[in-house]
Amino acid sequence: MVPLTSWMDVGLEVLFSQKGAFKRDSITYNSTYPHAYNLKLNYVEIPLMLYITDKNIVSAGVGVSYGRLVGLAELDDGQPSTYDDGVTIGTGDGRLHWRSDDPNLPDISSIDDINELNRIAYENCPGITYVSEAVANSTTYRPDDWNICADLRFRIWKGLHLEARYQYSLRPLRYRMYYSDPNQTIPNQIRKQYNNAITVRLVYIFNEHRSKANLEATKK
């Protein structure tokens, strides 16, 4: 952290973060639809924060964070998820794409409305019964994750602080066609996945008072 004024600081961090989603067994236990789900996304994150401190006790901060995906695992019922005839999850653009490699087909990677996707699929792939016959569900997550961050930090004792941080992805990590029922063949919508996290941590800031004093001395 570097003081800009006696009440404003800028901070740069390097973090390891594990995000994702978790769902326990549910009433779908006896069905063929996945009932237990565990997604782990491991990131190396670099947040850049600007803090404003009131009475040297409470600090509020805002900033952005860049996260690089360095590992991922997606489990359905304890087994690695597979899509489209055995394709496992990985990194990529996180978008929906045609199953066909025909270069004459229009780009559908930016479509996020299921009705628009259905219209384009049936217009360009005559003879299909379901849109999923022509469009493959995404099997990738974006490797880069930009987040907006907001912090609230309270001094507990000297350099020891209690801090809460909220983060939300600025763009989707992955697009997926969503089916509300395991027997459904027509997707209800296109869902966009984001990282949405709240973290609470203890932070100790070394040489905080000396840094403030140096700033005041420089001003004089």
Image: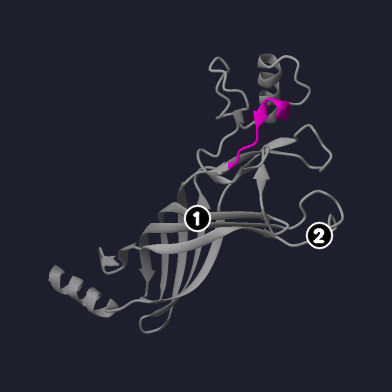
Q: Pick whichever, 99 or 147, lies toward us.
A: 99
**Image-quadrant location for residue 37:** bottom right
- Residues in magenta, as a range: 131-139
Mark nearer the N terminus (1 vs 2): 2
Residue type at the position of mark 1: Gly
Q: Pick whichever, 108 or 2, lies toward us.
A: 108
Q: Does 6 sit left or right of 134 as displayed?
A: left
Q: Does 75 sit left or right of 44 as displayed?
A: right
Asked whether residue 169 is drawn in magenta, I would say: no
Residue type at the position of mark 2: Ser
Secondary structure at badge 1 equals strand
Give coordinates of residue 175: x percent, y percent: 60, 39
Residue denoted by label 1: 71
Q: Pick whichever, 34 or 216, lies toward us.
A: 34
Secondary structure at badge 2 equals loop
> In the image, what residue occupies the spot 53% across and 66% down?
199
- Report the disc number at residue 202: none
Give coordinates of residue 43: x percent, y percent: 46, 57
Give coordinates of residue 172: x percent, y percent: 55, 43
> In the image, what residue occupies the spot 65% across and 36% down?
137
Where does the C terminus fall, quadrant-wise?
bottom left
As drawn, 215 above or below 20: below
